[in-house]
């Protein structure tokens, strides 16, 4: 069983001291709005959760929501609005790291270690923030019969 999730400085699996910022304990609430994803080796950047649907553990499909004020794009930085390459509906992306803020540090956590919370919690924990609230998974039962995987709909149901 995991005690939490590693907070990383860069969106890669490197677990060296140069990349790890610390362990985010299970049950800790974090704020995150962007996934770091790549369309090809040459194209990578940040995409808003509200612009993608998870279709596999590391696979995402662009899904522009009706009424969205911006076109989905691979942003070089999260604060850049529509600077990167535009993404058409249905485009497949790969990525497993979410940019999060723990309240003390900003870094990347693997999507597998995050679960979504409801809107009222988001409003009470992050007043004035449009970012979804996610939380590291609670400890697993002592002897689960089979490792449960969340369905794609459950894993991307974040508050925006």
Image (tube, rainbow, N blue to C red):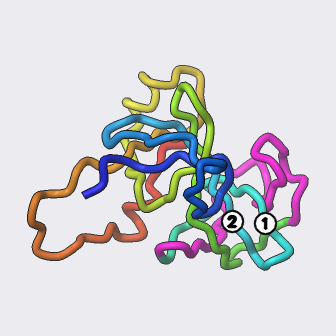
Q: Quadrant of residue 134?
A: top left
Q: Real-space Cα distance between discs 1 and 2?
A: 6 Å
Q: Quadrant of the N terminus?
A: bottom left
69 displayed left or right of 95: right
The front one of 123 and 107 is 107
Residues shaded magenta: 57-85
Question: SS of the residue at dot 1?
Answer: strand
Q: Quadrant of residue 71?
A: bottom right
Residue under pointer 1: 44
- Which residue does the image show at 36% across and 40% down from the upper left? 25
Report the label total: 2
The front one of 74 and 142 is 142
83 displayed left or right of 89: right
Question: SS of the residue at dot 2?
Answer: strand
Task: Provide residue 105's location: percent of width, then percent of height.
Answer: 59, 32
The front one of 58 and 153 is 58
- Which residue does the image show at 39% across and 43% down from the upper left? 135
Crowd tier of the residue under label 2, counting other residues whose Cα lies within 10 Å: few below 14, some 14–19, many 20 or above: many
Crowd tier of the residue under label 1, counting other residues whose Cα lies within 10 Å: few below 14, some 14–19, many 20 or above: many
Residue under pointer 2: 37
- Dominant secondary-structure state across the stretch colored magenta: loop
Task: Provide residue 7's location: percent of width, then percent of height.
Answer: 53, 46
110 displayed left or right of 60: left
Q: Are marks 1 and 2 in contact (CB under 8 Å)?
A: yes
Give above or below for 26 relative to 86.
Answer: above
Task: Provide residue 74's location: percent of width, then percent of height.
Answer: 79, 61
Q: Quadrant of the C terminus?
A: top right
20 displayed left or right of 66: left
Task: Provide residue 73's location: percent of width, then percent of height.
Answer: 80, 60
Q: Is 75 covered by the magenta stretch? A: yes
Give above or below for 106 relative to 74.
Answer: above
- Which residue does the image show at 47% across and 39% down from the upper left? 133
């Amino acid at each position: 069983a995991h005690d939490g999730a590693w907070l990383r400085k860069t969106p890669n699996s490197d677990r060296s001291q140069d990349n790890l910022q610390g362990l985010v304990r299970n049950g800790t609430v974090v704020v995150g709005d962007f996934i770091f994803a790549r369309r090809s080796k040459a194209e990578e950047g940040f995409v808003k959760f509200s612009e993608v649907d998870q279709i596999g553990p590391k696979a995402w499909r662009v899904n522009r929501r009706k009424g969205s004020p911006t076109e989905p794009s691979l942003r070089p930085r999260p604060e850049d609005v529509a600077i990167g390459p535009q993404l058409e509906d249905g485009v497949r992306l790969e990525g497993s790291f979410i940019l999060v803020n723990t309240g003390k540090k900003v870094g990347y956590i693997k999507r597998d270690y995050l679960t979504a919370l409801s809107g009222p919690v988001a409003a009470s924990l992050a007043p004035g923030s449009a970012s979804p609230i996610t939380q590291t998974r609670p400890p697993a039962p002592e002897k689960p019969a089979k490792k449960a995987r969340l369905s794609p709909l459950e894993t991307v149901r974040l508050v925006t």
